[in-house]
Structures are given as C-alpha cells and as structure tokens.
Image (cartoon, rainbow, N blue to C red):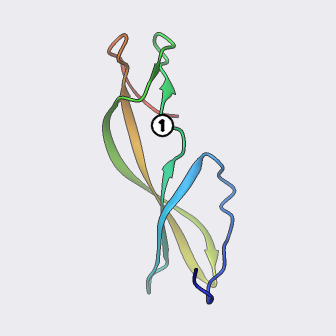
Amino acid sequence: MRDDSITVELGLPELRVRDEEETAYGIRVQVEYRQKGVGCPGCGGRTAGVHSRRLQVRRGRRVWDKPVYLVLSKRRFRCLSCGKVFTRA
C-alpha cells in the first residue's frame, strides 16, 4: 500500500475501479461493472454472454484542479435464450 496517496469514493456502487493514472491532462480512472450477468429485456432470462465491448469516457469532477475522466468498458450482451442483443443500462 502506498503511503503518499488518498482514496476518493466515486459514489457509483455498481462500478469497480480497475486502474487509475494521473497525467499532465488529468486523472484517468478505468472502471468496470461489478455485476457479470444481466437480465434480458426481451425474455427476462439471465445472461453473462458478452457480445461486444466499447470504451466510453465521461468527464467527472475535478480533483486538485485536474479533471477526472472515467473510462468505462461498456458491454453489449447476447441473450443465450432468445438471441436478442442489448446494452446494459
């Protein structure tokens, strides 16, 4: 554990921090969803079958006059029961 750092709560309990990096431009925080499986909006069945991923970057509040960027790997799922492809909300 580092002895020259602090922990700041994001206030997003559904996300888990995977990595963080401070650069000259800001603070980049890579996050992912905690929940692996989701319910299909078509048939209601549970699935964890990830169809594809894409990065989504959101600018958050500033810390020490630096912007904080949340980088989320957004997932699209394919239901194994009905075949519907959908995005986790």
Percent across and percent down for residue 74 are 41, 44
**Amino acid carrying mark 1 in the image:** Lys
**Quarter of the picture holding the N terminus:** bottom right
Residue 17: x, y in percent? 53, 60
The residue beneath circle 1 is 36
Q: Residue at x 48, y 14 (%)?
A: 45
Mark 1 neighbour density, 10 Å: few (under 14) some (14–19) many (20 or more): few
Residue shown at the point (48%, 37%) measured from the top left: 36
**Label 1: which secondary element:** loop
Q: Which residue is located at x 39 percent, y 39 percent?
A: 75
Q: Nearer the viewer, residue 39 or 28?
A: 39
Q: Is residue 77 above or below residue 9?
A: above
Q: In the displayed image of the protein, which residue is found farthest to the bottom?
A: 4
Please, is residue 73 above or below residue 59 in the view?
above
Image location of residue 82, percent across then percent down: 36, 10
Q: Quadrant of residue 25?
A: bottom left
Q: Is residue 27 above or below residue 57?
A: below
Q: Is residue 88 left or right of residue 64?
A: left
Single out the residue that lies furthest toward the front.
Answer: 1
In which quarter of the view is residue 62 placed? bottom right
Residue 31 lies, in percent from the top left, at 49, 57
Residue 80 sits in quarter: top left
Relative to 36, is 41 above or below?
Answer: above
For the image, the number of numbered tags is 1
